[in-house]
Amino acid sequence: MFEARLQSFADHANSDASGSRLTELRRELVREGLTGYLVPRADRHQDENLPPAEERLAWLTGFTGSAGIALVLREKAILFVDGRYTEQARLEVDSSLFTLEHLVEKPPHLWIEENLSGTDKLGYDPWLHTVEGAERIAKACSTAGSALIPIEGNLVDRIWSDPPAPPLAPVSLHPLRFAGQSPEEKLARIGAELQKLRADALVVSDPQAIAWTFNIRGADVRFTPLPLAFAIISRTERPTIYMDGRKLSNAVRNAIERVADVREPAAFEAALAALGQRKASVRLDQVTAADALARIIKAAGGSTVLGADPIALMKAVKNEAEIAGARGAHKRDGVSVVRFLAWFDQNAPGGKLSEIDAVAALESFRRETGALKDISFPTIAGTGPDGAIVHYRVTARTNRSILPGQLFLVDSGAQYEDGTTDITRTIAIGEPASEMRDRFTRALKGHIAVARAVFPDGTTGAQIDPFARQFLWDAGLDFDHGTGHGVGSYLSVHEGPARLAKLGTAPLRRGMILSNEPGYYKSGAYGIRIENLMLVVEGPQVPNSEKPLNAFETLTLAPIDQRLIMREMLTPDEAAWLNAYHARVFDELAPLCDEPTRAWLSAATREI
């Protein structure tokens, strides 16, 4: 049987100690004279993937999802999670200790406005909240007549007696053949943007931006090749990176120091204060900059301007080398996924496979490419009711057998030096029920509508998002997550600033890579999701059009399960798109497959 080496099936969710930990935290509230304290799932960089030492929310509550925040009061505690994690939180968190609230429909600031009073004092760690986030909560406290108090030293850290050690993974250089531009070229572009913004310096708080700018990668967090660090890029002076020197070999340090100074993290706060003392105008990233950064600079006499980090857009718009790498990575990954799907179709109907078996097999097929650096996130592999948990992660405790009559949802991705992948397929085990086929076809019609979209330059993700939902809406259905997210180039599988979502306000630019992943989830029964990655490209131009037109090129290569499609629900244009996509999948992947896999692929990509 296959073996998973890059992911664990240990059950990290453990709420058994939450009661005693809440008691200890409440003692700290009393010592500080606080009514409550905020515990976000965050580190100083607002990373999605955290080092174990930063998993304070999971340690306190048992919740292991990637987004959430707890508000602990002296008499009650509330955990806020979004729609992706509602089911997961119910399973992982002790409901006698924490009340669950929806992070989007009833976010913490609204709860605070309605529930705190004039004598209340709410504490927070300014290193774990963004500037905008802290301002929003401070305003809510003010509305309630209460106060938001910055606390030096995290209260959870005070009671966490044996936290894991901070990461010290080695930093590596990202070759120019994959990066496409040198650090010198990128720094020149950033300097020109600072000139336009009339900013004296940019504080780079997002490690993804640092990795991209200086063509370096690391392994301080799982699944994303990041070196955790801060940087200051000045309009007139050499940049400085603040990073633990123990991560740097002599060769890597020498390469970085050709374009930037390297300093230890302990020197960072003094450098921020120095910017303030010089009355510098400092640009902070509104997405990732910690409230502490602004507080240090302003306390020293400087001024900060909150806005988009100019590096975010540069990084999101892939250059020719990155685009070529993405196409190569998806073809390589497609062969691995097709090998898995063929293996799965042969073995699953017997009822002897488990979710863990499937995860291990898929990872093994990817490892056999010889190019796999890591998976891009823990594989989501849910059969039956587990598929309805949007970000389900199988553990030894939750592992289910995959049985006939079920749907199996597998969402996975890989990190290769030339690109990052993310793909979801929903597979029928045996004969699917008519309701399953109806819901799948509605999600597929939405997927095709997004894939076929032609849209004016400047269109935002929020304008595209309804394309994916319209056929579900027709039946009074929806899905409680975005339609798509940006994807990095051997970086994060979730990358800003663009996304296809109700709140996706960033314009889509040629060269961006985004996911297309509508779905449907019936709680306690099954889940459906169909996900490909797409590249924004020049679209077919219309005579006398007022704006240039853009379109999507689908990068992901793998069959979509035709057993789940109600052919009569597809229009001729939708069927033509599916047939053309499947023909391309076969043409590009079949020459790279062994004969049994090629035969399976031929059947799986037949015309509908």
Image (cartoon, helix red, strand yellow):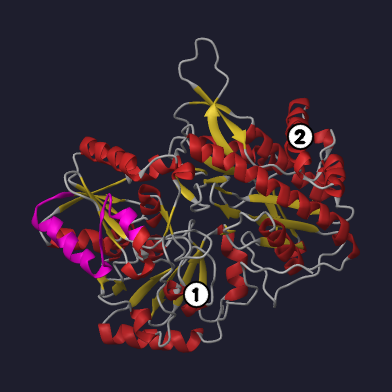
Q: In the rendered image, which quarter is residue 6 located in?
A: bottom right
Q: Distance between the residues labelled 1 and 2?
A: 46 Å
Looking at the image, residue 292 sits to the left or right of residue 512; the answer is left
Dominant secondary structure (helix, strand or loop) of the stretch shown in magenta:
helix
- Magenta-colored stretch includes residue 381: no
Q: Position of residue 55 (x, y in %)?
A: 46, 73
Give the side of residue 601 with respect to residue 222, left or right: right
Q: Is residue 477 visible?
A: no
Query: In the picture provided, is 184 more to the left or to the right than 378?
Result: left
Most foreground residue, 183 or 69: 183
Picture quadrant where residue 346 is located: bottom right
Label 2: which residue? Answer: 587
The residue segment tinted magenta is 252-281
The numbered dot on residue 529 is: none
Mark number, residue 58: 1
Q: Can residue 288 be seen in this view?
A: yes
Name above or below for residue 419 compared with residue 506. below
* Residue under the point 48% across and 56% down: 104
Quadrant for the C terminus in the image: top right
